[in-house]
């Protein structure tokens, strides 16, 4: 009988752990992996052993999205088990892993920070953080399979339908068990934390037509329409009443857009994404700069689409101005 087991895997982030789901089945499967740290691997290995399995018996690793706290151990577990790793083509794990195109990824981040107006003397430290974090927390992965080419995964007692839910990241996916109503939501739905979508550095050039917040709203609409019984999130405890959670996230994003609109209206001057982020957050240091300017970028671009702010590029950075 197929059984789903939630394994809490420690990560060095404020949310404390990532949920990895071991599906006990004739084709043993792991959904998400946590970061490449010894304590994270031990948590997964002991969690699988607790349910009479072994890491080397894993045959499929399904990645809900390409952030390091969900993909970091994919390469190590695949090496130990010969498991096939499935990830959306817009979330390639190899771009993050040692031996992959790290320098290209670093250049994407550099361009992202320049376009956001982050001070020049801060950018090298942020890029160094990207490279060091990737080398430390993401294990090398030599081969991955495109998740977008798969419509569903078959288990002994149910199927999981793959649903592309762009927004939290370009290639985020959810996995839905239509028989029992279980939704593996990755970071698309959290039980408590509400975060704005993160704009993937370089995504606007690589992914034609991708607009983070617009896409996220469409994904939320899709999820809200599903007959979900239980949400199995990437962080936090499983929960029900997914429609209520979707409404809270959507309302949060609307409030954030109105807040940024008011900032632009009150200032009445040209502003870049970093300037807006400084207005949103009382403290903006270290890697929080990425999340701050990513939030500002997503909402400013949405306001530009709606005709509320003008946008143009000057000196390598995007500038915005309130317009009546």
Image (tube, rainbow, N blue to C red):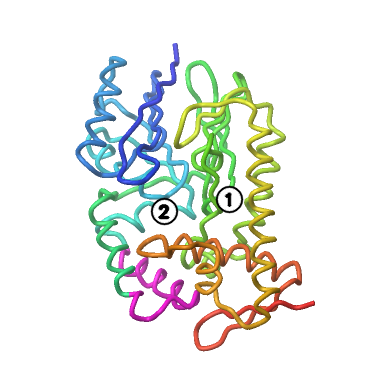
The residue lying toward the viewer, choosing from 214 and 97, is 214
- 102 falls in the magenta region: yes
Image side of residue 156 versus residue 75, left or right: right
Q: Residue at x 58, y 44 (%)?
A: 164
Which residue position is annotated with label 1? 166
Image side of residue 245 versus residue 293, left or right: right
Please tell me whether mark 2 sits on a helix, a strand or a loop. Answer: loop
Answer above or below: position of 158 versus 91.
Answer: above
Q: Residue furthest left?
A: 38
Residue 11: quadrant of the picture? top left
Answer above or below: position of 21 versus 308.
Answer: above
Magenta part of the protein: which range? 101-123
Which residue position is annotated with label 2? 92
- Give residue 178's position: percent from left, percent from top: 62, 24
Viewport quadrant of the N terminus: top left
Prevalent SS, magenta region: helix
- 163 falls in the magenta region: no
Badge 2 density bin: few <14, some 14–19, many ≥20, Cα 10 Å: many
Of the two numbered discs 2 and 1 in the rendering, the one whose residue sits closer to the viewer = 1
Please tell me how many numbered marks the rendered image carries: 2
């Amino acid at each position: 009988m197929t059984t789903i087991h939630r394994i809490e895997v420690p990560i060095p982030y404020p949310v404390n752990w990532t949920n990895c789901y071991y599906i006990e089945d004739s084709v043993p499967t792991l959904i998400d992996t946590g970061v490449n740290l010894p304590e994270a691997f031990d948590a997964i290995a002991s969690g699988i052993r607790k349910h009479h399995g072994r890491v080397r018996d894993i045959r499929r690793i399904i990645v809900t999205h390409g952030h390091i706290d969900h993909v970091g151990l994919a390469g190590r577990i695949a090496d130990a088990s010969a498991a096939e790793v499935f990830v959306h083509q817009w979330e390639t794990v190899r771009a993050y892993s040692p031996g992959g195109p790290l320098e290209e990824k670093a250049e994407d981040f550099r361009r992202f920070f320049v376009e956001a107006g982050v001070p020049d003397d801060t950018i090298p430290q942020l890029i160094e953080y990207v490279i060091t974090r990737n080398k430390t927390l993401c294990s090398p992965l030599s081969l991955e399979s495109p998740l977008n080419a798969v419509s569903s995964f078959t288990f002994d007692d149910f199927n999981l339908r793959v649903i592309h839910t762009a927004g939290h990241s370009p290639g985020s996916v959810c996995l839905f068990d239509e028989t029992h109503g279980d939704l593996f939501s990755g970071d698309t739905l959290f039980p408590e934390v509400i975060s704005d979508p993160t704009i993937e550095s370089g995504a606007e050039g690589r992914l034609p037509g991708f607009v983070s917040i617009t896409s996220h709203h469409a994904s939320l609409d899709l999820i809200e329409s599903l007959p979900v019984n239980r949400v199995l999130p990437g962080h936090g405890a499983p929960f029900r009443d997914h429609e209520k959670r979707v409404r809270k996230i959507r309302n949060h994003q609307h409030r954030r857009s109105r807040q940024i609109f008011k900032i632009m209206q009150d200032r009445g001057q040209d502003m870049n994404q970093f300037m807006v982020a400084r207005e949103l957050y009382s403290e903006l240091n270290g890697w929080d700069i990425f999340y701050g300017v990513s939030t500002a970028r997503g909402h400013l671009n949405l306001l530009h689409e709606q005709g509320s702010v003008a946008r143009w590029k000057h000196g390598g950075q995007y500038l915005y101005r309130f317009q009546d």
